[in-house]
Image (cartoon, grey):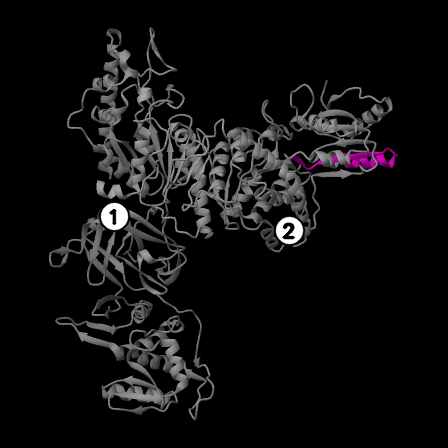
Amino acid sequence: MANIKELAKIPERLSGGHRLCAGCGASTVVRQVLMGTKDYVVAGSATGCLEVATTIYPFTAWKIPFIHNAFENSAATMSGVETAYRALKKKGKITKEIKFVAFGGDGGCYSDDTDIFTENGFKNIKDIKVGEKIWSVNPETNELELQENEKLHQYPYKGAMIRGKSRFIDFLITPNHNVPIWYKGRWEFIKGIDLIKRYKTAFLRKFYWYGNGIKISDIDIPKIPKYTYQKEFSKFEINKWLRFLGWYISEGCLYKSKSGYLIRIYQSNNDKKEKIYKLLQNLGLSPFKCNRSVDFQSKQIYEYLEKECGKGSKNKRIPKWALALDKGHLRQIFGSLMDGDGSVTKQENRSSYHLRYITASTMLMNDMVELILKLGRNCSVSKKDGIYRIGIDNEYLKHKLYSRRKLYGDKQQVTLENYKGFVYCPQLKKNHTVIIKRNGKISLSGNSYDIGLQSLSGTLERGHRLVYVCYNNEAYMNTGAQRSGATPKGASTTTVPHGKESHGKEQFKKDLTSIVAAHRIPYVAQASASNWNDLVTKSEKAFAADGPAFLNVIATCHRGWRFPQEKSIEISKLAVETGVWPLIEVENGVWRFTYKPKERKPVIEWLKSQGRFSHLFTEENKSVIDEIQKGVDDNWARLENLCNSTCKIA
Amino acid sequence: MTQVKSKKLPLTGDQAVATAMKQIDPDVVAAYPITPQTEIVMYFSNYVANGQVSTELIPVESEHSAMSACVGASAAGARTMTATSANGLALMWEIVYIAASLRLPIIMPVVNRALSGPINIHCDHSDTMGARDSGWIQIYCESGQEAYENTILAVRIAEHKDILLPVMICQDGFITSHAVEGVQLLEDKKVKEFVGEYKPDHPLLDVDNPVTYGPLDLQDYYFEHKRQQSEAMKGALKIMPDLFKEFEKAFGAKYDFIDTYKLEDAEIAVVALSSTAGTARSVVDGLRAGGVKAGLLRPRVFRPFPKEKIIGALKNVKALAVLDRAESFSAEGGPLYTEIKAALYDSGIKPLVANYIYGLGGRDIFPDDIKKVYSDLGAALKNKKVSNPINYLGSRE
């Protein structure tokens, strides 16, 4: 539901200085539709009242980029604009982030409090940049891989989201989000919503990592200008060196004073102290044991450690080259890291052990997670008083979520939560399912029913990410009310006037909404400016839809329909209340009434309200009114049928 | 295909143009297949499918939508191309004019084909000659090589800040589009350098500086906007020679508005567009061997009309035949003929001029046909009179 206070904050995109008639339905419709997104919008319009009245050169009423091409081709024109946007975005030529309302084809999105694990550690999903490398898992080989983020999708979301929570899993995703699960020994993707229906779902917890394939036996230490009498080193044996780095990262400190460059590994446990002492000796260093530490001096190593692993507990990190090594090497550094700041607790009443690592450094926390994942384990991270606690899982292959099992108080492991805010989704170069983008393009047109239908159909079929709005004034109004496919039965127009032998238009109007819905695009709706909340909500859905979206909005024309100009909204309302213009939507193939009048008013009230039907109120045309009522009733019944049948399938 | 330096490849004209498009690597291509242009779309789609270009291809549902999407994409700020032939060009007609009036530098290779009806898929120039007043620059190519090079050159012409007009690169359907010839390809890198990056001044997608494209333009401004279009076309006449020179400097190929053959001292000459010039050239050689002072003029650029160049080249010619591969139904001859005659009117030179409409619907033109034209000119020269100003060459009477 749209909140009128929030809507008031959205800047007007079509300024009031346009030259549309006072009381024109089109401008009201346009402004309400444009409230459906806070993002940048590019508008296109077909030749018609809207374009003619808003863009008389050298003036324009549009505060957003606007393009008009011709009468019948606004859909094709906007498909070009949308494609250009994608092309230029891809090439980085549009560097400025045009906030597009984005979506995934069969993807879905995470709530904005989600972090994503990137090359540079955890990052809030909102802050993920295009081109940034994100850790992902190749579903075919189950290997960890860095993949480039091609795009971050972001769109407002309101409604139910799926919460999955256990000791090692916590996510809040949209119901259409693709969830990778472990099923019968391989990966499968299911929809977030399906988690609710499943009794239990297994998640793979163990990924493979084979390292970057570079074999290193020794590690080179950069030389420094000769410093006093100290021994100079050129290389160390890799495994020993990694063990030492682990100790340093967990427990080490660097001190610089007049007396020299000191490296100190804190340790009060005598066994461990001995271990460190021996390791340092093995490396060829000259350590000495102190009360609560093992120390040694070397400017060369001091500088190396400061550069590679950081100085001070908040700046510690694991060197990138070390993280790229294979599992055997990683175990070396992991071992001494755990010997340092790690802890092992035996869990009560269980045979398993609980491994935990503690650090104050964000960089180190990120590096540890990477290390743990690469070792085929999994972990959870919590932060308290500036200290990260990383709980390390055993090498379980999978982890199960039970939809009905209660774990936290009364909360089930899988729940539905209401969410309002933005949802985001990164799009990776590889390993993605089809996650696609939309970009807040809108196309406004009154020529959709007839001459523009081919161009519209092609655009819908090609799946361009744009919202197509038909402001439906039920005739060719710009040229003075000529009959069109949208004109309802019985209406008198200049090309089908009523007369001795004619009661106006003979045929019922074309059902464009159904024609468009047959393209199986993600979102199709009929709306009316009188039901503004319904219209704005539908616009939001259209902008957020997964692919092309279509809005058919009844737009009164007091000149063509012949009623007093101040009655525009009243007449729009009457269209809804009589069932002449049912408020429906087709969301992913499911038809639904978004509003149903308690009791439909007789159609005669609608006919009475407008001059274009006035000739019907004669004895000989009485049957026409009956036919129109029957037409409305039949359509209503058809829609109810559609709603019932498609709902069942869903 | 990256190692193509100084290498001749056997390519059809369509392939050559598709290769040029690949090397240009435009941002957006929106195209609909039509014989004999189809191969261009096919080859280019392959490049897209294999990731050899970074182009976004819009497989539109009609030519009308192709040009509509091109207008949208080009206005948005993308380097945009399409390609078409005959009825396809006719279907996009409405938007062809709009593209030019919006000053959008869209590049469109056109493979000339007879415009229906009756329906015919073979070469003549009725399609692009009809579009001569649409505000597009038109370049006519004799060979696949020229079609290839002109496609690359066209990018610079169209996007030049003082021109900003769309360009059609025309080649003869089947005759060049489907004939295999050795095409000397330019280096990918050099082409990329030559075309440079497209930097539009007021792209639609510059959301910080919103602009309105295609506003309603009434009595108070429309005229000035059309005037600007015609000034741009005149300006192109002055600017294009610089771009020809730049092209020559980069690739060694010499370009000009016109191409002449043994015209310097010629007394009788033929004017022809595109591939027919090749046939005419061999006829000239034969005639010259027999001591006849015959020459040939081939306009390469038809829009803008290079009047000064044409007059300059014809200054010594005493009798002239203009060959038109299109009929204008004015009852006064073909489009090239009327324009050349108009150009001669106040030039001070007054050769005898005859018009020969030929090759409609792909009817072959043989050396003997052209020989007949020259012999008619010789007779006219003798009689100091053109016996029949408008002729239909190769048509059954």
Q: Is A624 on the left-hand or right-hand side of A446?
A: left
Secondary element at tag 2: loop
Closer to the camera in the image, A236 or B306: B306
Chain designation of label 1: A
On the rendered image, what quadrant is the C terminus of chain B found in?
A: top right
Q: Is residue A518 visible from the viewing direction of this image?
A: no
Q: In the image, which residues are magenta?
A: B280-303
Closer to the camera in the image, A35 or B4: A35
Q: Is residue A202 visible from the viewing direction of this image?
A: yes
Residue identified by numbered label 1:
A175
Q: Nearer the viewer, mark 2 or mark 1?
A: 2
Measuring from the top left, give residue A110's x and y in whole percent: 28, 53
Residue identified by numbered label 2:
B186
Closer to the camera in the image, A181 or A93: A93
Q: Is A614 on the left-hand or right-hand side of A53?
A: left
Disc 2 and disc 1 on one polypeptide chain: no
Measuring from the top left, give residue A55's x and y in whole percent: 42, 33
| Residue found farthest to the left | A410
Q: Is residue B286 magenta?
A: yes
> Are there few (<14), some (14-19), or many (20+) residues within 10 Å of tag 2?
many
